[in-house]
Image (tube, helix red, strand yellow):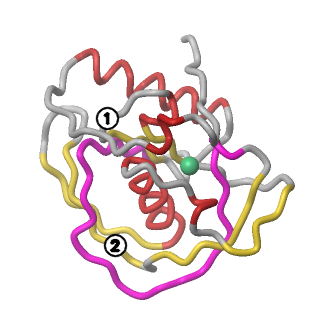
Amino acid sequence: MDLLEIKTAGDPVLKTICTPVEKIDKRLRNLLDKMAETMYAHEGVGIAAPQVGISIRAAVVDVDRKTRYDLINPVITAREGSIIDNEGCLSCPDLFGDVERAEKIRVEFINRFGKKKTLEADGLLARCIQHELDHLDGKLFIDIAKNITKGKKNSES
Ligand code: ZN
């Protein structure tokens, strides 16, 4: 499978507010699969459609390499607590910074087969989902992170 090109900070597509997905079809599922392959190839834990140049509200997340979530038109409907942790991003190579996020979230989304789903998440999964949803609103973690450093770390999304 061909990998997709990852857009990096400075590309205007990463600053664009994405439009809702209207049609869930084979073409969209193919895109989600390619996004996932691209994410795995770069050892990321999440990837959002604008990171591959497509301004639609879709993201793929897999933080434990066991459960992959395809999030279509995701909306966070509940947040609890607050926690600061180090983050990276496939679109901001080698940059890491501390970001304050909700500790627990509830997210509603449509899955790859058009079914409405609700997911309660905490830990890295909650952080990753919040990071990806920011991408859908044209926000990068480097805009909100503190103590940004250059270097290599594991979990990039
Ligand atoms: Zn990112």
Few, some or many residues within 10 Å of mark 1 (<14, 14–19, 20+): many
Instruction: Inspect the magenta stretch and tell me whether residue 134 lies in it.
Output: no
| Location of residue 80 by image quarter | bottom left
Which residue in the structure is indicated by mark 2? Answer: 105
Are the two marked residues, 2 and 1, in contact with CB atoms closer than 8 angstroms?
A: no
Q: Secondary structure at mark 1?
A: loop
Q: Does 115 sit above or below residue 25? A: below
Task: State left or right for residue 143 relative to residue 128.
Answer: right
Label 2, ligand 1: CB separation under 8 Å: no
Question: Residue reaching furthest bottom?
Answer: 81
Task: State left or right for residue 18 relative to residue 144.
Answer: left
Q: Secondary structure at mark 2?
A: strand
Q: Residue at x 30, y 68 (%)?
A: 120
Q: Residue at x 42, y 35 (%)?
A: 49
Q: CA distance from mark 2 to mark 1?
A: 22 Å
Closer to viewer: mark 2 or mark 1:
1
Residues shaded magenta: 67-92
Q: Does 24 sit above or below residue 44? A: above
Residue type at mark 1 is Ile
| Location of residue 146 by image quarter | bottom right
Question: Residue reaching furthest top?
Answer: 1
Which quadrant, please, contains the N terminus? top right
Is 29 in front, or is 145?
Answer: 145
Few, some or many residues within 10 Å of mark 2 (<14, 14–19, 20+): many
Which residue in the structure is indicated by mark 1? Answer: 56
User: Who comes first in sequence, dot 2 or dot 1?
Assistant: 1
Residue type at mark 2 is Ile
Instruction: Inspect the magenta stretch and tell me whether residue 89 lies in it.
Output: yes
Q: Residue at x 28, y 23 (%)?
A: 28
Residue 36 percent across, percent down from the top left: 49, 32
Residue 13 percent across, percent down from the top left: 47, 35
- Is the magenta region chiefly helix, strand or loop? strand
